[in-house]
C-alpha cells in the first residue's frame, strides 16, 4: 500500500511541476514574468569604474530601497578619488504596472525644461543633468555620474546608459516585457 501511495504521490508531483513550469512555446509563467533585477547587475561596479578611469566599490549603504526603486551607488577607492556613479531601477512586477512606471518616468521628464531627448537607447531616453533617464521594457533606469553638464559628461552618461540597457535587454526578453506589460508605449 505504501508503495502505491508513493507512486501516486510521485506521479501527482510530476504532473503538477509540468503544469506549473510552462513551456517556451506556450508562454508559461517563466516567459510572462521576468526575474526581479537589481541595479548593480544592470550597471556593474566594473562598468562604473571604466567610465571614469578609477577604482570603485559599492557604497557601504549597499543597494538602497526607496519606494519602488532600488539604488546602487559606487564610490571611488579611496573615497573621493573619482566621481560617484549611481543607478536607480524601477521594474514592473505583479504589484507595479509598467504603465505606472511610465507615468513616473514621464512626470519626472515633464518637470525638466532643460532635458534633451537621446535617440537609440531604450524605448525612450533623455538627459537632464546630472541624470540620464531611460524607459525600456517596463523599467525606469536613472543614472548619474558626477555633476558636470558638458559634452564630455553627456558622453559618459550615454555610455553608461547604453551598457545598462544592454544588460537589461539581456535579462528581460521582449516577450517577457510584452506578456507582463500593460505598457503605454508599443
Image: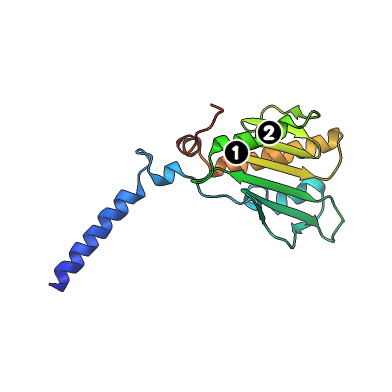
SS for tag 2?
A: helix
Q: Residue at x 81, y 40 (%)?
A: 130
Work out whether 167 lies above or below 154: below
Return the x and y of residue 148 as percentages of the image width and height. Answer: 86, 40
Q: Earlier in the sequence, mark 2 or mark 1?
A: 1
Residue 62: mark in rendering: none
- What residue lies at 34% left-to-right and 50% top-to-bottom? 20
Tag 2 near tag 1, CB within 8 Å: no
Question: Quick one: which residue is furthest to the bottom in this view?
Answer: 2
Residue 96 location (% of width, % of height): 54, 43
Q: Is residue 127 visible?
A: yes
Disc 2 designates what residue?
A: 107
96 left or right of 67 in image:
left
Spot occupied by residue 3 in the image (x, y as percentages of width and height): 16, 71
Q: Nearer the viewer, residue 110 or 82?
A: 110
Instruction: Choose top left, top right, bottom left or bottom right for residue 1.
Output: bottom left
Q: In this orientation, which residue lies closer to the viewer: 108 or 89?
A: 108
At 54% across and 50% down in the image, what residue appears?
36
On the image, the x and y values in percent for residue 23 come to: 35, 44
- Rendered image: mark on residue 101: 1
> How packed is label 1: few (under 14 Cα within 10 Å), some, or many (20 or more)?
many
- In the image: residue 7, left or right of residue 110: left
Q: Quadrant of residue 142?
A: top right
Q: Is residue 171 above or below residue 73?
A: above
Amino acid at each position: 500500500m505504501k508503495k502505491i501511495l508513493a507512486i501516486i504521490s510521485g506521479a501527482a508531483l510530476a504532473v503538477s511541476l509540468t503544469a506549473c513550469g510552462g513551456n517556451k512555446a506556450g508562454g508559461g509563467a517563466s516567459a510572462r514574468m521576468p526575474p526581479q533585477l537589481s541595479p548593480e547587475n544592470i550597471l556593474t561596479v566594473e562598468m562604473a569604474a571604466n567610465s571614469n578611469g578609477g577604482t570603485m566599490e559599492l557604497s557601504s549603504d549597499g543597494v538602497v530601497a526607496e519606494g519602488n526603486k532600488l539604488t546602487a551607488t559606487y564610490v571611488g577607492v579611496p573615497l573621493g578619488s573619482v566621481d560617484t556613479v549611481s543607478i536607480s531601477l524601477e521594474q514592473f512586477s505583479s504589484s507595479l504596472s509598467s504603465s505606472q512606471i511610465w507615468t513616473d518616468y514621464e512626470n519626472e521628464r515633464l518637470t525638466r525644461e532643460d532635458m534633451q531627448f537621446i535617440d537609440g537607447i531604450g524605448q525612450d531616453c533623455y538627459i537632464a543633468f546630472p541624470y540620464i533617464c531611460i524607459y525600456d521594457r517596463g523599467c525606469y533606469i536613472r543614472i548619474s555620474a558626477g555633476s558636470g553638464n558638458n559634452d564630455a559628461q553627456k558622453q559618459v552618461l550615454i555610455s553608461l546608459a547604453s551598457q545598462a540597457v544592454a544588460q537589461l535587454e539581456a535579462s528581460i526578453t521582449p516577450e517577457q516585457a510584452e506578456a507582463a506589460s500593460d505598457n503605454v508605449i508599443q
